[in-house]
Structure formats: structure tokens, C-alpha cells
Image (spheres, rainbow, N blue to C red):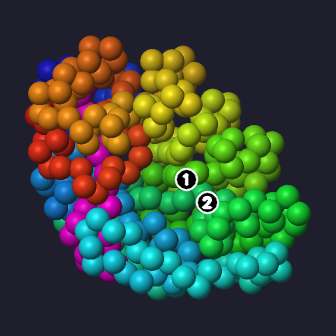
Amino acid sequence: MTEKLNHRDRLQAIFEGQKPDRWAASFWRHFFHLEHYAEGTAEAMVDFQQAFDWDFMKINPRADYHVQDWGVHLDYSHDEFAKHPKSMFPIRSAEDWSKIKPLPLDAPNLAEHLQVVNLIRKRLGPELPVLMTVFTPLSVAGRLVEDRSLLQQHIADNPEAVHGALEAITDTFARFAVELRNAGADGLFYATTQWASSDMMTWEQYREFGVPYDLRVIEASSEEAINLLHVCGSNNYLRELQEIDYHCQLVNWDTSDPTNLPLDQAYDVLPGKTLVGGVDHTGWLQHSGDEEIGHQIQRLQAEHDSSRLILGPGCSMPPETTSANLRAIRERL
């Protein structure tokens, strides 16, 4: 394929198993100092896209927008590189899970992020695929407690209490997924965060407390959606999850983590999926200069297939990632 494609057509060619006109890539990071209001988040995402012209946008909102309307409080950071401190966690005992009820979609933080999607779509037009970050219901539950070990304890000791809250969270974000499409998103960047990992729970536990709720949110985004499954962390359950149809054409994980599925083995493990990754976002992307980054990109291009792999990080990049290092990648596509 030699004719120059726009971003949407380039992704479609890859989904159809064709070699695109050039390598596709997408990268994402937080802009903590701007992500505490809709216009700021949209501005940060649009400026980043216009600077690097990535092939799809992963909207990187503040991570805790998922739980603020249930009572988690953030002290907004005005430092580009510092996270928002959290307080006032609503779950302190197993009985507190019963307080988690379905939210209306005009709840302030959900409505704000629907506005983010709408603003970005209006600014960037129809040719750029835009995916909105949504965490799985179990991951959302994990942000309602101050320490994740409390949720682990409640799963073991009070499973029905946790299931009740997961029902409310799933109801909320299934409806939210529909409205994200209406606001202009092409689909979801659907993130398990740390929970789909043997570091956090057994696979049998994830099948019970993760998978059924995950599928309901993903399926709500519609069959036409462009969805990406991001399986985060070390010792993750990507191999197990591939046996379940998550309705995601794209799959992303930290391929540089030695506890995870290696990229060169993933083509057989994930047949029919477009892989996103290959770049060691906390390793050589951070610590190498232009020449070394160029060698690393050339190595990936020599060892992999542009009809199966979109170059990207294994997770959200550290915000300190330099523009020069990202530009070194962009110039070699």
C-alpha cells in the first residue's frame, strides 16, 4: 500500500490485515496541571496530538474521575508532573459498599468528561480515531478504598457486598459508554489497571469479580466501536483473558515487563488482534538519546509486522518523557 492514508483509514487497513502506508503509532501521558477541568483536559490532548500527529488518540483524563461522584476527594495538582492527592474515601467497611448506587450521567465528573470528548471531537474533526479511557468496574471499586488490600479483604470475606457495588458501578459505566459514543468517541481504552494480575488476585477471583462486569461495559459501547483492552501491570492475565471475547480489536500491555507475554509470542496467543506496544516507556524511551531510540525503533520495525503492530508504550508514559524523544520516534514512522 503506497498511497498516503489518513489516520482512520490507516487503522482500518491494519484491522483488515493490510500493510499500511507507514508504521502507525500512538503515545499518551498525563498533563496533571490541566486535567482538572474539561477545557484544560481537551486543550492538553489536542495540543499533544497536533504536536505529534499520532494515529489514534487515547484521551488521558484524570484517573479518579471514575470515583469522584461517589465521594473521593482530590486536591488538584497544578504541577505538570505531580499527581492529585486523594482523600475522603467512601469505603471503610464492608457495609459501606451498599452506599454505592448507580450514578446519573449528569453527575458533575461524568458530565465533565463527556464534554471533554465532545470538545476534542469538535477540535480535531472526524478523521482521527479517539478512544476514551474507562476503567473496568473492579478497577473503579479499587479506587473507592484508601488501600487496595481492603478491597482484597472484602472480596475474600464479604463477596456479596462487593458484588452489589460492582453492579452499581457496571450499570453506571455501561450507560456512560453509550454516551461516550454519542459525544464523539470511537470507543473505549478499557483498562484493568492492576487488578487483572496474579499479584492482586487469583484467576478464579478475576473470573468472578472482573470478567462478567467487564463484558457488560464493553458490549454497551456497540459492535461498531473501536475498543482497546489495556491489561496493566506485572504478572498480568493477558493469556487467560485472550480466551474470552472482550470485543476489542486492539490490545495493549507492558511488553517490556519480563513477567508478561513477550511481544514476539503474542501474535500466536492473540490471533486476529492488533497489538499496541513494543516501546519500553520507562526504560530506553526515558534514558536514551535520539540515535539509540532510532536503533530501537528500527529493531522493532525489522522484527515485527506493520499490519499487526501499532507502536506505543506499555502504559501511560511518565509525564517527564521529553518531546525530543517522542519526536525521534515520530520521525522514523
Residue closest to the eye, 241 or 233: 233
Q: Circle 1 sits on which residue?
A: 193
Amino acid type shown at disc 1: Thr
Q: Quadrant of residue 100?
A: bottom right
- 197 in magenta: no
11 relative position to 229: left or right: left
Nearest to N terminus: mark 1 or mark 2: 2
Residue closest to the eye, 263 or 310: 263
Amino acid type shown at disc 2: Ser
Numbered disc 1: secondary structure: loop
Residue shown at 14% from the left, 49% from the top: 323
Which image quadrant: the C terminus?
Answer: top left
Q: Quadrant of residue 117?
A: bottom left
Q: Circle 2 sits on which residue?
A: 139
Is most of the magenta stretch helix, strand or loop?
Answer: loop
Up/down of 53 relative to 288, above or below? below
**Magenta region: which residues?**
18-45
121 relative position to 53: left or right: right
Residue 147 on image: x %, y %: 65, 68
Residue shown at 39% from the left, 35% from the top: 276
Residue shown at 45% from the left, 24% from the top: 263
